[in-house]
Image (spheres, rainbow, N blue to C red):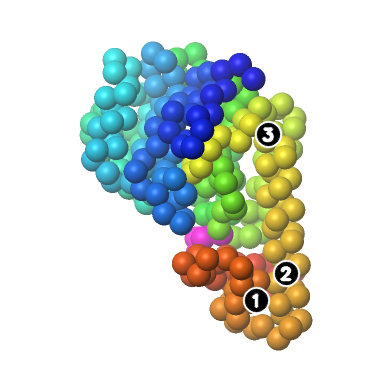
Amino acid sequence: MSGLHIPLGTPDGSRTEHAENLLAPNPSAMTLDGTNTWVIGTRDAVVVDPGPDDEAHLLRVRDHLGERRVTQILLTHGHADHSGGAKRFAELVDAPVRALDPRHRLGDEGLGDGDVITVDGLELHVYATPGHSFDSLCFWLPQDRAMLTGDTVLGRGTTIIAQDGGLGDYLRSLDRLRAAAEGLGARALLPGHGPVLPDPIAALDGYIAHRRQRLDQIRTAQAQGARTPREVVEIVYADVDRSLWPAAEVSVRAQLDYLERL
Ligand SMILES: [Zn+2]
């Protein structure tokens, strides 16, 4: 596809025609290669997720912008690996921060479902996609037919349901994104971590299937006598690196809550 560039080995520098990724240096089991900071616009710019409070990264993004004026900083959600550097970056470029959660805003303007942000002749359409966190948003960039997905869909592996999220919401959000991707003819998902996904429908179908499969596995583990989240993790995530078990436990707790309420 014209305009889509996915470098090998690192998400840094991946781009569509009007969106470009500058990777933050905070790799971990949870953040994959690190947080993707997306810059949208070639004259004026919007910056999505400045990333963690890492001065070198924030300066790199500012310097990369050159003469471009940052009109707004947007957050896909309030988790620190996306929002931690927002206040400092706002100072550096003198721009407001907009987020669904008022605690993460700087300035008067909120951000929510149905909002349309314009910059440099481009539009960003806001989709509320709660689940990974209660305040998760996705941004549709129609000019590039690209959806910025934050942590709702990652470039590799699967996301977790954080303590401030919920599985019922998450499943509805995935269905909504799937319908939007199909209806809008999406050509790329630009995630908050990991590489660009050039086949949105396949990626979303994979996510939805994975969630159903995990729920089935949890029902099976329960049938085998597992009761606590930890006991379920020991069975269902037996083949997963143990450093991820605490995160898996949070995810399992969300799934047990969901199954209990069905
Ligand atoms: Zn994240």
> Mark 2: which amino acid?
Gln
Secondary structure of residue under mark 2: helix
> N-terminal of the two: label 2 or label 3?
3
Q: Which residue is mark 1?
A: 235
Magenta stretch contains residue 184: no
Provide residue 40's location: percent of width, then percent of height: 45, 24
Q: Which residue is mark 3?
A: 199
Locate the C terminus and report the quarter of the image it occupies.
bottom right
Q: Which numbered tag is attached to residue 66?
A: none
Provide residue 133's location: percent of width, then percent of height: 52, 54
Residue visible at 65% across and 47% down?
Answer: 173
Residue visible at 29% across and 18% down?
Answer: 66
Looking at the image, the residue that sits furthest to the front is 9
Q: Is residue 29 left or right of residue 131?
A: left
Ligand 1 within 8 Å of disc 2? The answer is no
Magenta stretch contains residue 164: yes
